Image (spheres, rainbow, N blue to C red):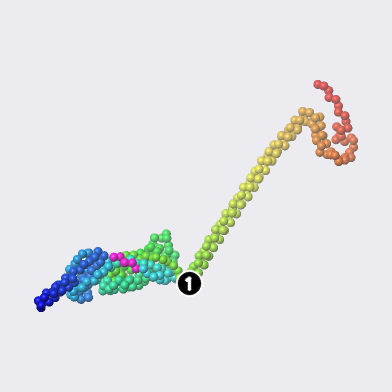
Amino acid sequence: MKRRLWIVGVLVLGVYLLATSIVPVKETEIAVVMQFGKPVRTIREAGLAVKPPAPIQTRMILDKRLQMLIMEPAEFVTRDRRNLVVAAFAAWRISDPGAFLESVRDRETAQIRLRDLVNASIGAAIGNFPLNDIFAVGDPAQGVGRIFQGVTDQANAMALREFGIEVIAVRPSRFGFPRQNLRAIYQRMISEQERVAKQYRAEGKEAAANIRSGTERETRELLARAYRESQIVKGKGDAEAAKIYADAFNADADYYKLTRTLDAYEKILGEETTLILSSDSPIFEYLLTPPQPVAAP
């Protein structure tokens, strides 16, 4: 009976020693071998590893995958004393498991410590720039991308040294302004838009005045040119008419005199016209004098 108990005890002890001596490591894990609470060995490759049995050495399994830290919006002050609310996130992973276990021990504590470190880095970076430079687009030495690259480098250096954590990237997810400052910001935006609108209206009025003055000048020039041409045509017509009259008069003076007199009758005599003139007046020559016979050629 005692022999069976010894055999069972030896088997149990053997199973225990075997179970605590073999360390299975997954592809997504890092195994840290601890001896009396201190890390003595790090296993990064996936597979089975062997160590002295517990309690001489124990194991601690850590996640080596990329972790995401989502930070709550926090208020920061720019160099020109403008309050800015920034929400950001950080991608990180364990780089030095020994330092990680000695400083923070677990993922939850690491998240808390890393959040404080990243927020401090963001506040220091934003405090070095005025608001306009933070949102600058054309200058590659400024802008959000450049600022948060500096935040990433600073946070990574401190996290590696203090926590054994590698910070891959820190990026903003949202920018905003404190609620109490929104009214003043909107008012400045309205004032700026009104200034731009006034400038556009003034430029439009100036352009309209230039167009009107140019049009009026062109109109006067066209009218003057048309009047000059009309006077030239009229003068040529008067000259041509005078020439025709002169030619007609020279061709038959009596006939020309008759037609001109008849035209005068038509203009001055009507149904109710009364004239008191001497009968010797030349105008009545054709009315009172019978026509003379024309000699045959």
In the picture, residue 152 is in which quadrant? Answer: bottom left
* Residue visible at 42% across and 59% down in the picture: 138
Q: Residue 271: horizontal and vertical position, in percent?
A: 85, 39
Give the residue at x 69% y 36%.
236
Element under disc 1: helix
The residue under the point 19% across, 66% down is 48
Say if residue 238 shows up in the picture: yes
Can residue 151 be seen at all in this image of the molecule?
Answer: no
Q: Residue furthest front?
A: 1
Residue 142 is a magenta residue = no
* Foreground pick, 190 / 59: 59
Report the residue that reaches farthest toward the bottom.
2
Q: Residues within 10 Å of mark 1 (few under 14, many from 20)?
A: few
Figure quadrant of residue 49: bottom left
Q: Which residues are magenta?
A: 65-69
Residue lying farthest to the top in this orientation: 297
Instruction: Write the residue at 30% across / 71% down.
Output: 107
Q: Is residue 221 above or below residue 293?
A: below
Q: Quadrant of the C terminus?
A: top right
Asked where in the image residue 144 lies, by quadrant, the reply is bottom left
Most common secondary structure along the magenta stretch: strand
Q: Give percent across and percent down for residue 234.
A: 70, 39
Residue 71, horizontal then vertical, whole percent: 37, 69
Quarter of the rendering occupied by the N terminus = bottom left
Q: Which residue is mark 1?
A: 180
User: Foreground residue, 225 or 21?
Assistant: 21
Mark 1: amino acid: Gln
